[in-house]
Amino acid sequence: MSYQYVRLVMRSLFLSSLVWVLYACVGKSPDSSMGKVSALAPGSWSATKQAQAGVDGEWVAKFGDSRLNSLVREALVQNRDMRIAAERVFRASEAARVSDATSRPQLNMSADGTRQKSIFVGFPFGGSLLSNTYGVNMAVDWEPDIWGSARAGKSAALAEWQAGGQDYRAARASLAAQVCKAWFALAEANEQVTLAKEALEIRKKTEAAVRERFERNLSEEGGTASQLRLTQTDVASAQADLSGQQGDLEIARRQLELLVGRYPAGKIAARMALPRIPSKPAAGLPSELLLRRPDILAAERRYAATVKRVKEAKLAVFPSFKLTGSKGTNTDALGKILSSDFGVWSIGANIAQPILTGGRVKAEIRTRRSSEREALAMLHKTVLNAFGEVEQALAAEHWLMRREGEIKKALALAKEAATAAEDDFRDGNGDLLTLYTAQTRRIQLASQYAALRHVRLSNRVDLHLALGGGFTVSP
């Protein structure tokens, strides 16, 4: 066979390989499987009749705090969980590349050199012989994807990569929500410290008034020893409450620092008070949630990937084809290693058909079908949980707002009652028990009001997160 004929055959093999490579490159992600769960979406939310389209993408900025925006930006860059999530997405993309590479021809080049000495013992043929062998070889190894098994695997890998991207989106939104909640917790802790200090001053003033009456021996006006001990107990208790609130403030500082990727030194500046609660966002339609929430989109992509994995396993029962070709040189002189006069070549083809596999192929198909059913169940679960989170946040929004208004009204009345009780006690017309009760209610309601505003802010964050919209952080 002439060298020119070999070149023609190798060229034909290369061109056919190129055609198959271009065909294999047309790997696409699986079609959407959201129709499997679209029937779960109701026509409207049960907790609200509002159905304005769209989701507020500026919800972080709507809290009106530039320092919060800065902390969210810092966390997205410095938080270690975000780095971990980013690396997982990177690995998924590389896995998709590896899956794509398996269906392409593999081209390898090798060079070798050997110097061998053979020794012969005995007369009359004793002696030794030195021999040199040099060679260079280029080989093509390719298994064409005749049945589409490799394309199914590549499609599954692309879907898994897309799922990882949605996981990353969800992680970003979750981190922004955690930073917001931690910032609000820090602000509430700061308010509680301020309220505890005010409560301590109130108790000290009451203790001073009772002490004055006790020293003047005005037992009939609330100056007995037992009453003095009671007010002293109140002062000590208020001091303990203040220490507890200050401890909570320090913990809140460190939790926020960890979230934004700083060392937990407890030095981050706290907001003096909780921000106002922005207007209620549009909830949109329930069906829009299926196309917006990253965890739902990730679950759908994982289900779509399992469908392709089942197809990949089914196609494994068909015969596989493998083509090989190589060209190179083999000579005993290093200077002739690139000379075509010493060329060697080979062309080969192989076909393999699974016949007896001990049930491995069928077991693999059953395993992947089980994974498909599990992924579909997980998709249903994710969708129902998402609807539940939105409904719960919407319902909580309504009742928390009502409760805040009622506690605000009760706090105003408690302040008036405490002021009146203090005036009566100072004038000698009131008793200590009434004063103590009025002051205690004022202190408790003020603390409850701050805690409830914090709960409302956290629920608002949960609502934005449940609605699944993206977010932007203004500079």
Image (spheres, rainbow, N blue to C red):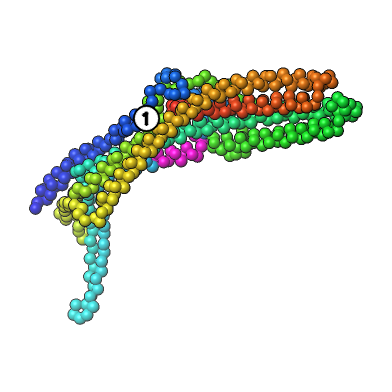
- Taking the spot 61% from the left edge, 31% from the top edge, the residue there is 186
SS at mark 1 in the image: helix
Residue at the (54%, 32%) spot, across then down: 179
Q: Nearer the viewer, residue 65 or 123?
A: 65
Percent of width and height locating residue 335:
22, 56
Question: Among all residues in the image, which is located at the extreme front?
Answer: 220
Residue 18: image quadrant is: top left
Between 16 and 181, the one lying in front of the other is 181
Residue situated furthest bottom in the rendering: 123
Position of 272 relative to 299 (above/below): above
At 55% from the left edge and 31% from the top edge, which residue is drawn?
181
Q: Is residue 261 above or below residue 41?
A: below
Could you tell me residue 134's position as x and y percent?
23, 58
Main SS, magenta residues: helix
Which residue bears the numbered disc 1? 40
Q: Badge 1: few (under 14), some or many (20 or more) residues near its Cα, within 10 Å?
A: some
At 71% from the left and 20% from the top, the residue drawn is: 415
Does 292 appear in magenta? no
- Percent position (x, y) of residue 61? 51, 23
Task: Answer with left or right where residue 70 lies relative to residue 90.
Answer: right
Q: Where is residue 166, by image quadrant?
A: top left
The magenta stretch is: 77-90
Q: How many marks?
A: 1
Judge whether residue 326 can be spotted in this image: no
Q: Nearer the viewer, residue 230 or 473?
A: 230
Q: Residue 112: horizontal and vertical position, in percent? A: 26, 57
